[in-house]
Amino acid sequence: MKARIRGLLSEVGFSGLEADVYVALLQEPGVTGYRVSRLIGKPAPNTYKALDSLRVKGAAVLDESSGSRTYSALPIGDYLNGLKRSLESRHEAIEKELQGTAVSLVEGGIYKLTTVDQVYARARAMIESARSVILLDVFPPPLAELEPDIRRAARRGVSVFIKAYAAVECRGCDVIAPEAGETADLRYWNGDWLNIVIDCREYLLSFLKPGGAGVHEAVWSRNAYMAVLTYNGILHELLLTRVGHMMRADRTRDEIRRHVRELGRKYFGDSPWREVLPESWTRQWKEHRRRPAPSGKARSAGPRRGRKRRKRLVKEE
């Protein structure tokens, strides 16, 4: 327990010694610095330095009214609120000063994320920057966390396709969720998926520990080729899941074909992968699209030649 408390306090700016001193003051308020040094088993000079540092941070107070110098800890909520206000007041100035200094990450890099905050911050930034398409394969807790951001993206005209694992309504989005009376079996996974790809140009694949306690695995990248493959993989997963739902609902073949064709036009028809891959990789496709059909002939001449050949073989027989 003590190690866990020290770890949590270290995440909000306490050194190991400061954490020990602060916990001692919580357990025994109104004591002298010497008494604190005895409680934690540290030299008195080091203890007094830690006490002075805690006072500067706003986590402890000094009382000299009784003639002796005694210390007490302030509630951790007071310290955290002060820290939050200080950060908010400096946030804009720091961001502005560093804006001209930062160099963009290498576009083709594949980066490992190690904290839950990094994962959610990157996911929100991706959703906000999406121009045309967002695909999500996401478990219920991360979806609930990101739902306001997803709704805003849909309202500004971004096509959003979500595979959810619990019933959810997200206006303006295509959502695949368990059918009535059906629940997704998530018990095999000790954590939560959060997989997202935007515009065929950026993707985030993450597996978070239960309750947001940490990260099992998370990678993020703007590697164009990998993003295109991820886009296609997730999209086909979503389409196959939707087809399965429609088949179990006894929808007709024509209904299924029509629905898949609509989704295909929406998410494949104007697929942005053609814009993100290097031109040298797609030039042949672009030239083929630009090339006019021969005069008086349909574009798909190949199949007609095949039909003529079959007719000729029949005559020869």
Image: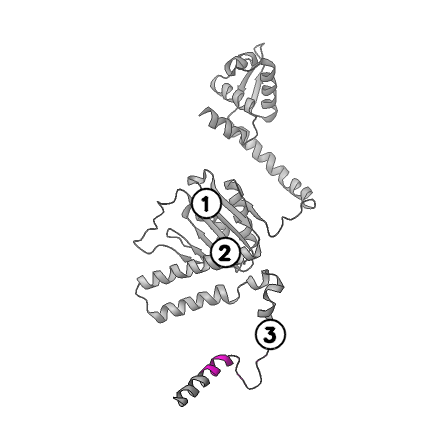
Residue appearing at x 48%, y 43% in the figure = 217
Q: Mark 3 and mark 1: span between their CA atoms?
A: 43 Å
Q: From the top left corner, tell me how far across and down residue 302 is, in percent.
A: 50, 79
- In depth, the one of 73 and 284 nearer the eye is 284
- The image quadrant where one finds the N terminus is top left
Q: Which mark is residue 230?
A: 2
What amino acid is at disc 2? Thr
Identify the secondary structure beneath mark 2: helix
What amino acid is at disc 1? Phe
- In depth, the one of 14 and 110 nearer the eye is 110
Res. 192 in view? yes
Of labels 3 and 1, earlier in sequence is: 1
Within the image, what quadrant is residue 132 found in? Answer: bottom right
Residue 247 appears left or right of 35:
left
What amino acid is at disc 3? Arg
Q: Is residue 88 above or below residue 131?
A: above
Badge 3 is on which residue?
A: 290
Of labels 1 and 2, earlier in sequence is: 1
Residue appearing at x 59%, y 79% in the figure = 292
Q: From the top left corner, tell me how far across and down residue 274 is, in percent.
A: 57, 64
Quick one: which residue is furthest to the top in this view? 67
Residue appearing at x 36%, y 69% in the figure = 255
Q: Is residue 60 magenta?
A: no
Identify the secondary structure beneath mark 3: helix
Q: Mark 1 and mark 2: span between their CA atoms?
A: 16 Å
Q: Which residues are magenta?
A: 291-306
Badge 1 is on which residue?
A: 207
- The image quadrant where one finds the C terminus is bottom left
